[in-house]
Image (spheres, rainbow, N blue to C red):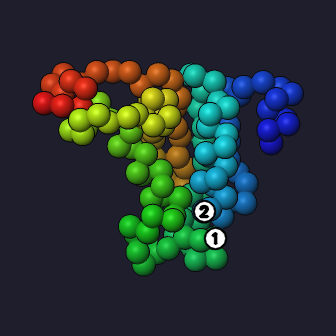
């Protein structure tokens, strides 16, 4: 994948319709999202596999951190990282670059840009 991206350049849209194995979806996102241009959209299809054992999913423990749905749900907190009350907090790449996320039936859309909106109360992750 890196060779292809190096040849064509950063991408405007990425649609993950790959193996649907939860671990693969997460690894692919971690690899490809940084290659997406600002203003780009990353789409994950067939997220129902998050609930299917054969794909590494889990219907019993809906808090299982190894499922793709829980991985992406955990990223929703990055949208509001300027509100964390954690003095000295260091922003992750996703904190800085995810500007919105939309969850639909069996689909997730993640929009990339500069997540630099400040809190109206918290300064430098402190009261």
Query: For numbered disc 2, what is the local secondary structure?
Result: helix
Q: Where is residue 69 in the image (x, y as percent from the top left)?
A: 48, 58
Q: Are marks 2 and 1 in contact (CB under 8 Å)?
A: yes
| Image quarter of residue 38 | top right
Q: Which quadrant, please, contains the C terminus?
A: top left
Q: Can residue 58 be seen in this view?
A: yes
Dot 2 corresponds to which residue? 22
Residue positioned 82% across, 29% down in the render = 6
State which quadrant residue 89 falls in. Answer: top left
Image coordinates of residue 64 in percent, x first then y, are 44, 69
Q: Which of 90 and 30 is in front in this view?
A: 90
Farthest front residue in view: 88
Whether residue 13 is visible, yes or no, is no
Query: Which residue is painted at 63% across and 70% down in the image?
Result: 55
Q: In this view, does 108 lie to the left or right of 73?
A: right
Q: Residue at x 42, y 25 (%)?
A: 115
Residue indicated by mark 1: 55
The answer to whether 2 appears left or right of 34 in the picture is right
Residue 8 percent location from the top left of the image: 83, 26
The image shows residue 106 at horizontal and vertical percentages of 54, 55
């Amino acid at each position: 994948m890196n060779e292809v991206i190096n040849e064509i350049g950063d991408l405007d849209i990425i649609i993950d319709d790959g193996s649907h194995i939860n671990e693969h979806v997460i690894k692919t996102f971690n690899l490809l999202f940084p290659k997406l241009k600002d203003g780009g959209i990353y789409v994950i299809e067939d997220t129902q596999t998050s609930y299917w054992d054969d794909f590494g999913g889990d219907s019993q423990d809906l808090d299982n951190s190894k499922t793709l749905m829980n991985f992406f749900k955990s990223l929703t907190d990055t949208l509001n990282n300027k509100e964390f009350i954690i003095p000295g907090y260091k922003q992750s790449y996703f904190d800085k670059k995810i500007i919105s996320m939309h969850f639909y039936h069996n689909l997730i859309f993640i929009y990339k840009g500069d997540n630099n909106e400040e809190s109206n109360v918290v300064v430098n992750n402190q009261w």
